[in-house]
Image (cartoon, rainbow, N blue to C red):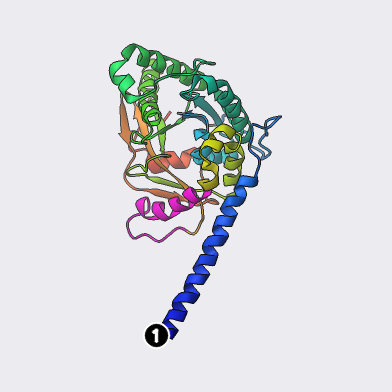
Amino acid sequence: MGSRRRKIWTDHHRQWLGYLTGLLQHVQSGRKIPLGPSEPSPQLATKIPAVLKPLRIAYCAPHPDDESLSGALALRLQLETGARVTVVAITLGRDEGQRQRRLRELESACSALGFDLVVPNAPHSMEEVTLPSRQNRRALWLRHRKMLQMAFEEIHPDLVFAPHHDDFNSTHIGTHYLVVDALRQYLAQKKQHAVMLAETEIWHQMNGPNLMVGIAPETVAIQLVAACEHAGEMLRNPYHILHACRLMDNVRRGSEVVGGQGAAAQPFSFAELYRISFVAGNKVVAAKPGGQMVGPEDPLDFALLKKWFWPGSGKVQ
């Protein structure tokens, strides 16, 4: 009996070891795919629907490459509804000597995604976009706020993406507060009622995500084409190699965190998590209670997002 039990263990262990070995081989095969920036830059080949008044999206990226790694919702809205996505490069990184290189990579990545690009204070970018700067360097912070406000005035966004307030990296955290501050000022100047805010996560899982967006493999591949244009960052830390694994784990986590404790696992493979709220007047307004899970083939547009999340009887402009 003991030998039979050991054989069962050995057989199962061998099968799972084979699974893991094969998985690692597939993951490592991604290292053979060339990194950019390509010459010329890759241009999105997927057709974007032509619409009369496209949804206007501002994706506020703390660093070059964030637009490629956490922008799946913006990408889906572009591909499925003709939304116009503009990446607002909050910084070009901390190292001044690398900023031209990172800007070139960012331009190439945005071309691969089909996104527009705005770089406030180009070619220098913003510096010290951190919570301590907001608290202790008021003049610098107000200059940054004005630059971002001017970008919003150019884009007229209906939907703005920014990291959540606890996303570990100091620039991610600072970007969150800068975006909210600039949006408040923008709304006050324009007398606009509200703008939808989609909070993203890269470095630290957010509390209370309320939207899980399923992503088809074809769309994840677009993200990876763009991410690989950021060669300097991918060589330093190969985010692109494990990007799909992170998206797979989001399905495991999001099925219950968004869908409710004990909810059934969703049947798709890749997803990104977001927390939707609204900047209205001088405050951030939470979405109405409840989470939404959207499969890769499910319809997704701005009207649905408003229907699911807008908490009041007023109108989101």
Q: Position of residue 6 (x, y in %)?
A: 43, 80
Whether residue 230 appears in this view of the structure is no
Q: Residue at x 53, y 50 (%)?
A: 296
Question: In the orientation shown, which residue stands out farthest toward the top?
Answer: 139
Question: In the orientation shown, which residue stands out farthest toward the right?
Answer: 40
Whether residue 242 appears in this view of the structure is yes
**Relative horizontal placement of residue 218, taking residue 172 as reference (left or right):** right
**Relative horizontal placement of residue 177, taking residue 158 as reference (left or right):** left
Residue 129 lies in quadrant: top left
Range covered by the magenta-colored residues: 244-266
Question: In the orientation shown, which residue stands out farthest toward the front?
Answer: 3
* Residue that mark 1 sits on: 2
Q: Position of residue 137 (x, y in %)?
A: 32, 15
Q: Quadrant of the N terminus?
A: bottom left
- In reply to whether residue 224 is colored magenta, the answer given is no
Q: Secondary structure at mark 1?
A: helix
145 over 288 or under it: above or below: above
- In reply to whether residue 264 is colored magenta, the answer given is yes
**Relative horizontal placement of residue 139, taking residue 304 as reference (left or right):** left
